């Protein structure tokens, strides 16, 4: 079970990192089309409502993407640390809440209902980081 949690954290980090990489490498990409049943949501999917709403342009998109990348890299490193990778094994108590907190900031900047699961995961990681690390390292 502890290894499964480590893999889950690392996978969440990889997904977060991929979202950031897309935002950094293609900051002018158009929003992704969403299903018609979600057309009630006013914001775009795949673009930051905050960056677009404040007209921050390409630089704002890149900064938002870098937030996603930082969160993702931290979560991957924390997952690897939870899995027992020697150089990272002592870092999860610090990395988990910090990376998940950065992820929450990125999620607020680009919120869409599709991201509700990610919000729940990041909030759980911030709140449960000490006990999660203790359980995995026991």
Image: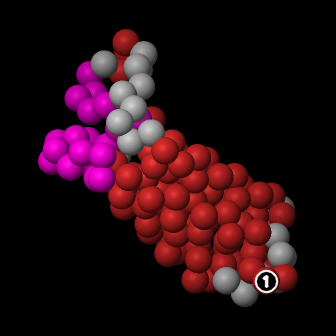
x, y percent for residue 72: 57, 59
Quadrant for the N terminus, please: bottom right
Q: Is residue 106 above or below residue 45?
A: below
Left/right of residue 38 with respect to residue 118 in the rendered view: left
Q: Which of 13 and 26 is in front in this view?
A: 26
Q: Tell me the SS state at disc 1.
A: helix
Image point (62%, 57%), residue name: 13
For residue 13: magenta?
no
Any part of residue 34 in sight: yes
Which color scheme did the rendering employ for the protein?
A: secondary structure
Q: What stretch is highlighted in magenta?
A: 40-60
Marker count (numbered): 1
Apparent side of residue 36 relative to residue 12 in the rendered image (left or right): left
Query: Which of the 4 image quadrants contains residue 92?
Result: bottom right
Q: Residues within 10 Å of mark 1 (few under 14, many from 20)?
A: few
Q: Does the magenta stretch include residue 46?
A: yes
Out of 121 and 87, give the one closest to the viewer.
Answer: 87
| Residue, far top | 36
- The image quadrant that residue 96 belongs to is bottom right
Q: Which residue is drawn at 52% across and 63% down?
A: 71
Look at mark 1 in the image and give the residue it sits on: 87
In the picture as drawn, the residue positioned furthest to the left comes out as: 54
The residue at the far bottom in this view is: 90
Q: Position of residue 36 (x, y in %)?
A: 37, 12
Residue 26 at what x, y percent from top left?
A: 44, 39
Left or right of 110? Residue 138 is: right
């Amino acid at each position: 079970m502890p290894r499964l949690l480590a893999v889950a954290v690392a996978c969440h980090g990889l997904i977060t990192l991929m979202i950031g990489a897309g935002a950094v490498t293609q900051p002018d990409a158009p929003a992704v089309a969403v299903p018609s049943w979600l057309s009630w949501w006013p914001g775009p999917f795949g673009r930051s409502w905050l960056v677009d709403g404040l007209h921050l342009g390409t630089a704002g998109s890149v900064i938002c993407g870098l937030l996603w990348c930082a969160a993702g890299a931290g979560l991957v490193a924390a997952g690897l640390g939870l899995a027992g990778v020697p150089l990272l094994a002592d870092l999860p108590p610090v990395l988990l809440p910090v990376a998940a907190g950065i992820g929450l900031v990125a999620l607020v900047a680009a919120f869409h209902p599709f991201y509700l699961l990610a919000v729940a995961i990041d909030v759980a990681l911030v709140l449960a980081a000490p006990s999660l690390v203790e359980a995995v390292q026991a």
